[in-house]
Amino acid sequence: MTDDDKDAIRGRSRHYAPLGQPIAASRPEPGLYLVATPIGNLGDISLRALETLAGADCIACEDTRVTRKLTERYGIATPLMAYHEHNAAEALPKIIARLAEGQAVALVSDAGTPLISDPGYRLVRAAVEAGHAVTAVPGASAVLAALSLAGLPTDRFFFEGFLPPKQGARQKRIAELAAIPATLVLFESGPRLGASLADLAAGLGPRAASVCRELTKLHEEIRRGDLTALADHYAQDAETRGEIVIVVAPRPEQETTNTDVDELLRNALARVSVKDAVGEVALATGRARRDVYRRALELAKDGAHGQE
């Protein structure tokens, strides 16, 4: 960075205008600030987030065009720079260099909380390793918004992100998710929604679920039902445009018999190694890992004898 660039940063106006009237923003202490931004409704941003964005020396964002809509809405003149998975090798060292110069850098995603389904963790790890302060400025999150609206258990949940786009890989991953004793939260795109729901219904059974589309936006839709019914609905001509979160209830809690364990093991052994099958079934049933391992070896031995 040139001396002229540094002078421009020091001399620029640091203001934000939440209600149309400019408010002076103080410059944050040097470091990296993880700032949550709205997931749709631009009104869903905190005063602290606005002041941080206005006071920072630079805002690192996935898409400068998207973030500029937010900064222009609130009269923020902080310079923007792109940081995303495709330019990280080049952009990350530049951000670390800014931090080394004593700058305050704000990191945002296109929507929601940074590091949730984006590559920001690499920057956080590099900043921490270099000894720079990292601060969270929390706010909107599509994951938490969907969880709160779904009407399903929230004491334990597992965030999967996007399922694989190809059906074979997707079905395999769903089979692995079936054993997790927690509410599942997934992202999905509109074109794949119907196919993914059909695979979820086939792999998980008729669990209760919720499809949350366009959260916080004008055409927000929350559709609840079991996976089979939801798959049938979106297999028709239903609206699927926009950002989508799927929330699926945890597997039903029930006592597992030895027959159940054997059946789960046989299914798992047909897909994965003995070690992975044991871990999967132990997690799904709550049985001791050593007991499941012993039974897996017996089943594998019986299977080998049956082929002789």
Image: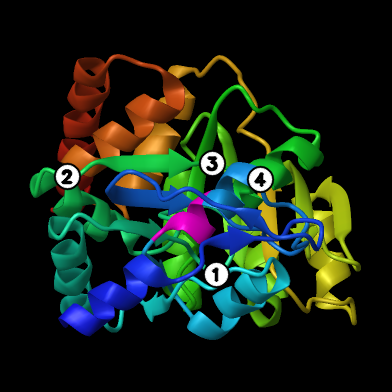
Give the quadrant of residue 22. bottom right
User: Which one is nearer the viewer's eye here, 76 or 32?
Assistant: 76
Q: Main secondary structure of the magenta part?
A: helix
Q: CA distance from mark 1 to mark 4?
A: 16 Å
Callout 3: helix, strand or loop? Answer: loop
Callout 1: helix, strand or loop? Answer: loop
Q: Is tag 1's residue or tag 2's residue first in the polypeptide sequence? A: 1
**Residue for badge 2:** 128
Q: Residue at x 42, y 37 (%)?
A: 264
**Residue for badge 1:** 110
Which mark is nearer the camera, 1 or 4?
4
Q: Left or right: where does residue 47 sit relative to residue 271? A: right
Image position of 300 with respect to 24: above or below: above
**Residue for badge 4:** 46
Which mark is nearer the camera, 3 or 4?
4
Q: Is tag 1's residue or tag 3's residue first in the polypeptide sequence? A: 1
Label 2: few (<14), some or many (≥20) within 10 Å?
Answer: some
Magenta stretch?
52-56
Q: For residue 124: magenta?
A: no
User: Which one is nearer the viewer's eye here, 193 or 82?
Assistant: 82
Q: Residue at x 81, y 34 (%)?
A: 151
Q: Is tag 2's residue or tag 4's residue first in the polypeptide sequence? A: 4
**Residue for badge 3:** 138
Q: Left or right: where does residue 111 sit relative to residue 121? A: right
Q: Position of residue 212 (x, y in %)?
A: 77, 56
Q: CA distance from mark 3 to mark 4?
A: 8 Å
Q: Position of residue 300 (x, y in %)?
A: 19, 40
Circle 1/circle 4 CB separation < 8 Å: no
